[in-house]
Image (tube, grey):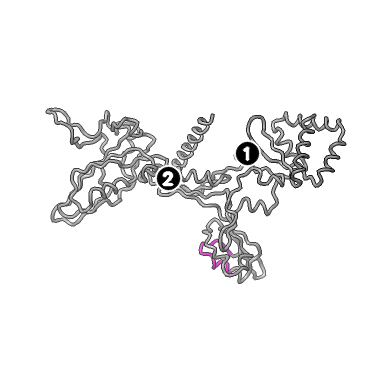
Amino acid sequence: MSKISSTFQLIQQRARVKKDEVFIFYEAKHKSIAFCILLQRIANPQTELRERSTKTMSEEDESMSEFEEQEQNDGGVLDYIMNLDSVPTKLPPHLELLRTRVLCNNDAPQHTDTIQYSGAYAALGVDNSLRWDNFCKNFQVNVINLTDEVIEFDMIGIDPALANSFRRILIAEVPTMAIERVYIANNTSVIQDEVLSHRLGLIPIRADPRLFEYPENAGGDQNEKNTIVFKLHVRCPKGQPRITVKSDELKWLPNGSELPCEDAKPNVGSKPKTFTSFTCSQDSLPEFSNNPLGPTNSDIILAKLGPGQEIELEVHAVKGIGKTHAKWSPVATAWYRMLPEVVLLEDVEDELAEELKNKCPANVFDIEDIGKGRTRAKASKPRNCTLCRECIRGGKEWEDRVSLRRVKDHFIFTIESTGALPPEVLFTEAVKILEDKCERVITELS
């Protein structure tokens, strides 16, 4: 018996159990890609059985040859079935709206979930599975705004889980340099040593973490490849007014620590042992010679000293990630929101147009002249919508005039860097980290 006959026999057997829609599942040539395609509606299984039994062998052979010819092409069986005239390729408008939009009503948003199941619309003949060619065709990244510290861009054609993965990696897994050890020689200010150390640890350091190693890779040895040393020594003379100690008082020590170790035994004529073991000066390295290391901001307040008070200390910055401590997080914030969509369901004219424009605090709506002394409202800046819902408050008539929506696969992404790395570099590093995670998963499963 041919493949076509076997397939329709399976359909007829399933039709006896369920007379509604009949599905066929096909695993494409060891790729484990399952899809669900509607082949036909069988209103009366017995009639369908009689019709199939009267089909001649020549017709079966002709269909089989067409099937095998289509299978030999690049598209395979999937494209053959999807190209049939009886198989629709698009959802009805109302289902497409619910699949791609979040409806923001006056009380609560609706249809917030994303439909992941590949056979969700199989009854309508639509394949909802994630296909690589469709993803490459639809995915876009459009940069809207870029400064030294902030980048705003649109990510189009991705799932919320993937957008959230980038956000979490930016916050917790992109490494930076931060102050980890504080050696206090003298502190007579009113700030306790622990509080001062905590404030020092939160100062963003202007240093490219890609040029440094993790301290654990050196076995606890603090050298020029994994440690940056700064010193701070400030004193307020007696009889002088109070002074403010800011982050610009931190001075980079390219030769390493200058404080002797407490447990080191002094040797006559030899250099005392310090907390670091630099083999060369960091400013002699080409990557640091023209770009001295230091805090990203020079006006961060650390303490205030009264007359006669003094602070003398040394700090060591090492490489780490925000998952360990927030001081290593490279972003002040990284967040996203779905693209707003404001749709006027009917023409809002004259006095109602003015009322609608005045309702919106984000200036989403504008007034246009339509001639003969009449005006009409239009949504000229839907991107500014903050979903305050003021435009649909005031009765059901306003809900019938204005529809607030969010596009499920269009995200407005904003990254605010602390200054250690430019924001566009941070996103690139986040992509690399996610790629490494995927490669590890593939390696473990293979």
Q: Is residue 134 above or below residue 341?
A: above
| Residue 36 on image: x %, y % | 68, 40
Q: Mark 1 points at which residue?
A: 131
Q: Is residue 316 above or below residue 377?
A: above
Identify which amino acid the numbered label 1 is placed on: Arg
Query: Is disc 2 in contact with disc 1, using a CB cutoff of under 8 Å?
Result: no
Quarter holding the N terminus is: top right
| Residue 376 on image: x %, y % | 63, 66
Q: Which of 317 and 346 is in front in this view?
A: 317
Task: Please indicate, yes or no, whether residue 446 appears anywhere in the rendered image.
Answer: yes
Which residue appears farthest toward the left when viewing the image?
268
CA separation in Å, label 2 and label 1: 30 Å
| Residue 197 on image: x %, y % | 27, 46
Please tell me in which quadrant of the rendered image residue 355 appears.
bottom right
Q: Residue at x 44, y 40 (%)?
A: 425
Task: Please indicate, yes or no, whether residue 223 appears anywhere in the rendered image.
Answer: no
Callout 1: SS = loop
Per the rendered image, the range of residues in magenta is 354-366
Q: Name the residue under label 2.
A: 171
Please tell me in which quadrant of the rendered image residue 175 appears.
top left
Quarter holding the C terminus is: top right
Circle nearer the N terminus (2, 1): 1
Which residue appears farthest toward the front when viewing the image?
17
